[in-house]
Amino acid sequence: MKKKFCHADGCFPALRRHFSICCHRHAAQGVRKVEKSKEKVVSDKSSLFYGVHNIYVDKKAMPAYKAGGKYPEGSRFVVDYYKLKEENGKPVKGKKNMIVLMKKDKKFKETGGWQFVGFTGEGKASKLDPVKNCYECHLKEAKDRDYVISKYTDFK
């Protein structure tokens, strides 16, 4: 039986090619169990995480995410980034502007054993360089947490 894969705002072929991960919408249907973070708003324009975002963590990664330790091969993260806009004087989620994926894969030695892939809000491949745009920051910010920048305490 062929598995279905999707993303919160639709099925993107590029996502299915790179990651066999499902969004929260179909997790209940048994496609693949993921957990979704609370919505995080970062209004500091100098921050790497400026905007509104949600993190999806698969069941293989979750125990290590909670412990802050080494991740098993195949662990997956998806982060949806949205633009920040203002309504009635309050910051709110705008249009989706980026989808970033991480998959623990020992073949990617130049990026610490993680595959990094980025997409536009429409699901098209972005021009992110996995070493310059992803790994170098993860190395600087989270080498001691197996290159995962976010922490479980920020997740819930």
Image (tube, rainbow, N blue to C red):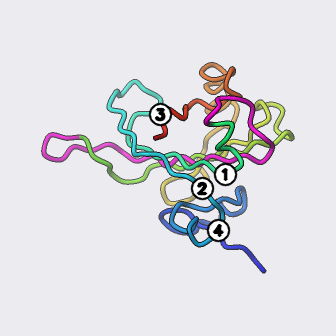
User: How far is the residue under mark 2 from the one under mark 3?
Assistant: 16 Å
Q: Position of residue 149 (x, y in %)?
A: 58, 29
Q: Could you tell me the amino acid type at mark 2?
A: Val
The quadrant where residue 112 appears:
top right
The magenta segment is 66-90
Please give the residue where the numbered disc 2 appears in the rendered image. Answer: 34
The residue sitting at the left extreme is: 88
Q: Residue placed at 27% from the left, 46% from the top?
A: 92
Point out which mark residue 5 bears.
4
| Helix, strand or loop for disc 4 | loop
Please give the residue where the numbered disc 3 appears in the rendered image. Answer: 154
Q: Could you tell me the amino acid type at mark 1?
A: Lys
Q: Position of residue 61 (x, y in %)?
A: 68, 44
| Helix, strand or loop for disc 2 | strand
Q: Are marks 2 and 1 in contact (CB under 8 Å)?
A: yes
Count of numbered labels shown in the rendering = 4
The quadrant where residue 130 appears:
top right
Point out which mark residue 59 bears.
1
Of 152 and 105, nearer the camera is 152
Q: Could you tell me the amino acid type at mark 4?
A: Phe
Of 145 and 80, nearer the camera is 145
